[in-house]
Image (cartoon, rainbow, N blue to C red):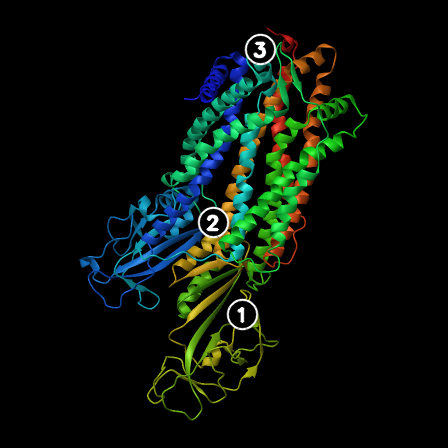
């Protein structure tokens, strides 16, 4: 081993010893550094777990899939299956109905997580669904599913997440139309290829969520710098040179980094079970999935100590530690602006180079976009110290608390700026992210054309039986909150042109309802019972427009000759009307009439739709509606909405909310630790000011101003950078610019976090302003 390596090892060991045997001051510094680094490590380990979370969900989803290679022939090992489900209090409850072709003699394998295929009338549910059904909260859902006998629960391998609401139900009346025949579960579905715009959105989310972490770690590594320098000065007195002091300081920071990683690992293990119980937008996971990828975990283990040690050595570049306890900093020079804007210019340049073409999502485009976003965010943090120095250097006068605060910032604004950097990156990145997300959402939004002033709920059933539907209407009208029910029946029927008797292959649609409902489906000014109205179909409709004298087969007859059929109805004279979008946004075409126009006949097969005017402020009203409709064949009810977005975008939004909330919480925790450390460093100063007559409230407000000034400047700068970055990203993917006020929510959230941190530090502030703070040894 060379002499240089031995010297490094010796000095590092001494630094390690000083950090754990240097008394209360050293212990406090090590503890605060440990906590600060631990919070950053938690974020990194959670980020490193994302690949495993996604892989686990994907594998379980593939394993239970009913799609893919279906079979044609029935057998003892084949099953008829179809997707099923309902909604309850805004949460989607999904499931699969199963009917073995061989009945009880089936040899088919059950789905993953289920020991045996449920018999007709039986249901196997997920643990989360079982808890919901057994709770008072799920009383109406239990009523909806009371015709199914619960016989077991689905194991973890059959679920996407611990909080998923899922079930398998056995049936014996499944029609082959609309069902799949399979011989096993587990057809690989393949990954849905993401649109390049969504790829860019995910990349920005990743950068925004991860960039504050190195800032948290480097800030924590600089805790207690002034006290450490005084200890190092004592070592200079007994013969240590400047190189030794830097290596000893590196050893001290290494202890905090290693302990921080250990504590971060323990915190990560501790929060895994609670995280697995959280469901956001119907998305959850399992504890076993929250496991860091080994390569990424190794990267964290290596990077955190190197970052902590590197930060310490970098911080000491302008410090000269001399004997006799004298610490002399190199002469302060005004911060230079030029190098601070270079990253921003490079970032804008990288993004600007991509504006001439469409963002393709290729590897090169991804790297270029990530680099551009990262450089712009780095520029925002680099500009803040210069901005604070320039602004505070021009502040003069004011109350005593204001003068104390501004003078402190003029002498040393570094700690306050470092505490603000993490929030700055979060605000700038989130502002750009929300601008991009709102633009993508606007482009992806699909209007439903529903008119919520005319109806709020639509229900559909696969039966045209008047008595069945009429009974449901009576039940629905008795539900509190339901003001009116507007039912109408729709039938696809064969049409024989006047004089034709051969086989028919043409069809039309007839809609039967009361006049109060027909006026909602077409522009009918004076509806009368017994009249027939013709709403002409558009060219792309697969129905014909029958004329007077044409014959309609109300009892079927597709592909058959007219002779010998019953249930025939001759089209009378009709009145042409202009179609009107129904309250649900759908256009109804064909022949519209009241039941009297059918001369006592009624079609055999059809469907029914029910439009409801209801007050949904009580969320149980919607569930009671669903309970009534669920008793009808293939009954389904849904609340009408004005617009819909894709499931992919909803999933990205879900993970964005989860990540942003977690990062803001951890940044707040790290800032609190940083603020407490800054107050501890100023203990003697605060106590001295109180001892000479300074009022506690004056000192309290001075600390508040010291936080508020960098916060105001930082949020203003971050919002500006975020808006510029957001506009660049929107231009990159050809989205119209907008959302210029997207910075307000994140700026407010950032300011709120800082306000909470300030309030949390007040108890320590009052305690430090006591006379015993002057005591020394």
Q: Which residue is mark 3?
A: 234
Q: Residues within 10 Å of mark 3 (few under 14, many from 20)?
A: some
Image coordinates of residue 172 in percent, x first then y, are 27, 61
Find out whether the residues at labels 2 and 3 contact each other: C-beta distance under 8 Å: no
Find out whether the residues at labels 1 and 2 contact each other: C-beta distance under 8 Å: no
Look at the picture and state if 550 lies above or below 440: below
Look at the picture and state if 201 lies above or below 254: below
| CA gap, disc 3 and disc 1 | 92 Å
* Viewer-closest of 718 and 355: 355
Q: Which residue is mark 1?
A: 517
Residue 146 visible somewhere in the drawing: no
> Is 281 on the left or on the right of 777, as rendered?
left
User: Looking at the figure, which quarter contains the C terminus?
Assistant: top right
| CA gap, disc 1 and disc 2 | 29 Å
| CA gap, disc 2 and disc 3 | 67 Å
* Viewer-closest of 382 and 472: 382
Look at the picture and state if 215 lies above or below 145: above
* Mark 3 secondary-structure assignment: helix
* Mark 1 secondary-structure assignment: helix
């Amino acid at each position: 081993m060379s002499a240089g390596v031995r010297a490094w090892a010796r000095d590092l060991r001494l630094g390690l010893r000083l950090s754990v045997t240097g008394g209360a001051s050293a212990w406090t510094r090590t503890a605060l550094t440990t906590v600060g680094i631990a919070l950053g490590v938690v974020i990194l380990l959670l980020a490193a777990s994302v690949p495993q979370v996604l892989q686990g969900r994907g594998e379980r989803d593939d394993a239970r899939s009913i799609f893919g290679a279906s079979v044609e022939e029935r057998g003892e090992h084949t099953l008829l299956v179809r997707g099923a489900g309902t909604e309850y209090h805004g949460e989607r409850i999904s499931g699969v109905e199963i009917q073995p072709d061989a009945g009880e003699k089936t040899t088919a394998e059950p789905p993953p997580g289920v020991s045996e295929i449920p018999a007709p009338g039986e249901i196997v549910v997920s643990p989360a669904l079982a808890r919901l059904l057994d709770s008072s909260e799920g009383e109406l859902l239990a009523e909806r599913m009371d015709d199914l006998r619960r016989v077991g629960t689905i194991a973890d391998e059959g679920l996407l997440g611990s909080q998923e609401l899922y079930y398998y139900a056995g049936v014996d009346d499944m029609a082959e139309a609309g069902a799949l025949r399979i011989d096993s579960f587990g057809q690989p579905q393949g990954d849905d290829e993401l649109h390049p715009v969504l790829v860019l959105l995910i990349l920005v989310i990743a950068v925004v969520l991860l960039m504050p972490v190195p800032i948290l770690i480097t800030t924590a590594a600089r805790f207690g710098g002034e006290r450490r320098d005084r200890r190092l000065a004592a070592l200079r007195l007994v013969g240590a040179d400047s190189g030794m002091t830097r290596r000893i300081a590196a050893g001290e920071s290494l202890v905090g980094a290693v302990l921080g990683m250990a504590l971060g690992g323990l915190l990560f293990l501790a929060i895994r079970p609670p995280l697995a119980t959280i469901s956001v937008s119907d998305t959850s996971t399992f504890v076993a999935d929250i496991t860091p990828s080994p390569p990424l975990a190794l990267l964290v283990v290596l990077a955190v100590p190197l970052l902590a040690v590197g930060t310490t050595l970098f911080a000491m570049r302008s410090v000269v530690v001399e004997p006799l306890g004298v610490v002399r900093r190199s002469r302060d020079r005004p911060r230079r602006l030029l190098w601070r804007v270079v990253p921003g210019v490079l970032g804008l340049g990288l993004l600007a180079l991509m504006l001439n073409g469409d963002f393709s999502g290729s590897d090169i485009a991804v790297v270029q976009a990530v680099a551009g976003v990262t450089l712009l965010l780095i520029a925002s943090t680099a500009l803040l110290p210069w901005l604070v120095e320039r602004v505070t250097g021009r502040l003069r006068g004011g109350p005593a608390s204001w003068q104390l605060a501004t003078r402190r910032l003029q002498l040393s604004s570094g700690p306050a700026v470092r505490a603000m950097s993490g929030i700055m990156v979060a605000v700038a990145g989130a502002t750009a992210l929300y601008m991009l997300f709102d633009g993508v959402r606007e482009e992806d939004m699909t209007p439903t054309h529903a008119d919520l002033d005319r109806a709020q709920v639509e229900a559909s059933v696969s039966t045209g039986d008047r008595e069945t539907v009429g009974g449901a209407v009576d039940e629905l009208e008795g539900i509190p909150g339901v003001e009116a029910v507007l039912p109408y029946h729709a039938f696809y029927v064969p049409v024989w042109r006047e004089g034709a008797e051969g086989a028919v292959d043409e069809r039309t649609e007839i809609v039967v309802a009361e006049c109060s409902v027909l006026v909602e489906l077409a522009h009918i000014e004076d509806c009368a019972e017994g009249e027939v109205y013709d709403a002409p179909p558009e060219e792309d409709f697969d129905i014909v427009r029958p004329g007077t004298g044409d014959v309609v087969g109300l009892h079927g007859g597709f592909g058959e000759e007219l002779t010998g059929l019953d249930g025939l109805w001759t089209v009378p004279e009709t009145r042409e009307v202009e179609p009107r979008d129904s309250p649900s946004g759908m256009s109804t075409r064909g022949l519209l009439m009241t039941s009297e126009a059918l001369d006592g006949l009624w079609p055999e097969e059809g469907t029914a739709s029910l439009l409801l005017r209801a007050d949904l402020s009580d969320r149980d009203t919607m569930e009671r509606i669903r309970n009534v409709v669920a008793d009808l064949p293939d009954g389904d009810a849904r609340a009408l909405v004005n617009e819909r977005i894709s499931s992919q975008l909803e999933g990205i939004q879900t993970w964005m909310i989860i990540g942003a909330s977690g990062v803001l919480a951890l940044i707040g925790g790290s800032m609190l630790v940083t603020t407490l450390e800054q107050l501890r460093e100023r203990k003697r100063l605060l106590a001295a000011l109180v001892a000479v007559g300074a009022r506690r409230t004056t000192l309290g407000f001075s600390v508040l101003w010291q936080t508020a000034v960098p916060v105001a400047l930082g949020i203003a700068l971050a919002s500006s950078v975020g808006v510029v970055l957001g506009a660049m990203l929107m231009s990159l993917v050809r989205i119209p610019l907008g959302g210029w006020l997207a910075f307000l929510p994140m700026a407010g959230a950032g300011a709120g976090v800082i306000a909470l941190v300030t309030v949390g530090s007040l108890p320590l502030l009052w305690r430090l302003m006591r006379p015993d703070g002057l005591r020394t040894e």
